[in-house]
Amino acid sequence: MMYALLRRVLFLLDAEKAHNLGLTGLSFLHACGLSSLLAEARVEDPATVMGLDFPNRVGLAAGLDKNGAHIDALAALGFGHIEVGTATPRPQPGNPRPRIFRLPRAQAVINRMGFNNSGVDALVANVKDSDLARKKGKNGVVVGVNIGKNAGTPLEKAAEDYLFCLERVYGVAHYVALNISSPNTQNLRELQKEAALDNLLRQLKAAQARLADQHGRYVPLALKIAPDMEDADINGIADAARRHGMDAVIATNTTIARAGVEKLAHGNETGGLSGAPLFRPSTTALGKLAHALQNEIPLIGAGGILKGEDARAKMAAGASLVQLFTGFVYRGPKLIREAAAAVQTAKRPDS
């Protein structure tokens, strides 16, 4: 009830201002010990995925907390993992405003943020300041760090940006997600193509092995992919992930398709579409990837989860974990608990 009232107020504001104000408010409530006003106790459903112990299978997708400044407040709402970022080597402002558009009738959002962030070093400092980032296992929330390239970095030098970020975040992340699928950085999705992907993963896996020796611990690497791919592309992603020994694949990022929202206000804005219209294409891509991989690599299902049944469907399609973002914006902490309860009894590829 309280979140419904807060959302009504926040939705009167510009979407990006509401986003920032909402995060600030969550951190204020947490600092005052009042997170329970918004969320009930976390659903306990321990799971081991990527060699990490998660308190439950529902996480927050990257993009909400871009600089890792609100980890503790978000974790207090009942998530089993928090993925922060996307972080880039250098700070960048992102694309011009306005760049977030709500489509309430479709329970959707279009964004073209463009990896706006304070840079990877600022994110690392914030993660180090977080209490929960230093914990993992059944009593703590897993913290993933999502990394990408700067908009001004030529595509042929993209690997350098990912390697730079991996070096910086390795010591504070429980896992690292490679974002090669945002539609809001020009040509970024070209990195999903066979030769570019092979080159990127080869370099990052070599760096991971070196960093594991250096730090005395293995930090898994997850690959985040787009939903807008043909079957041959999905099979190519699966082959590359298998060949390079990726630890997980996140399916999926936002879509550039506009089916079902074209006639709505803001429906034809450029950027990535998330929320309810993304559920079907992202779940279809997840299922095809699961079929191609045959449980060899864990999958994280993201895209369009607005209710518990949606989270259960992701698990049925082959996910071991699920992530929320736009659904959380529309429904608040209630969705976290609902989704976590729904997947407790779902069929799991790792069970």
Image: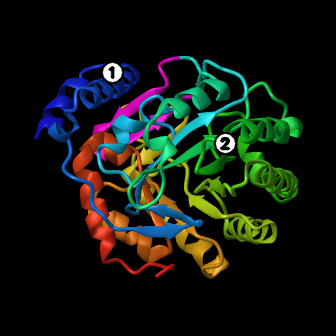
Residue highlighted by disc 1 = 21
Q: Do the numbered discs 2 and 1 sit on residues whose CB atoms are within 8 Å?
A: no
Judging depth in this view, the residue of 316 and 89 nearest the camera is 89
Instruction: Find residue 64 and report its horizontal and vertical position in percent.
Output: 45, 36
Residue 333 shown left or right of residue 302 in the figure: left
Instruction: Find residue 257 and report its horizontal and vertical position in percent.
Output: 53, 49
Judging depth in this view, the residue of 169 and 98 nearest the camera is 169
Q: Is residue 109 magenta?
A: yes
Q: Secondary structure at mark 2?
A: loop
Q: Is residue 121 magenta?
A: no
Residue highlighted by disc 2 = 171
Distance from label 2 to label 1 (Cα)? 30 Å
Q: Residues within 10 Å of mark 1 (few under 14, many from 20)?
A: some
Instruction: Find residue 126 and report its horizontal and vertical position in percent.
Output: 53, 28
Q: Residue at x 67, y 70 (%)?
A: 231
Which stretch did the figure color magenta? 97-116
Q: Residue at x 59, y 43 (%)?
A: 145
The total number of labels drawn is: 2
Q: Residue at x 32, y 40 (%)?
A: 329
Residue 267 shown left or right of residue 345 in the figure: right
Q: Is residue 141 above or below residue 110?
A: below
Residue 281 appears in the figure: no
Instruction: Name which of mark 2 and mark 1 comes first in the sequence.
Output: 1
- Three-letter amino acid code at the position of disc 2: Gly
* Colouring convention used in this rendered image of the protein: rainbow
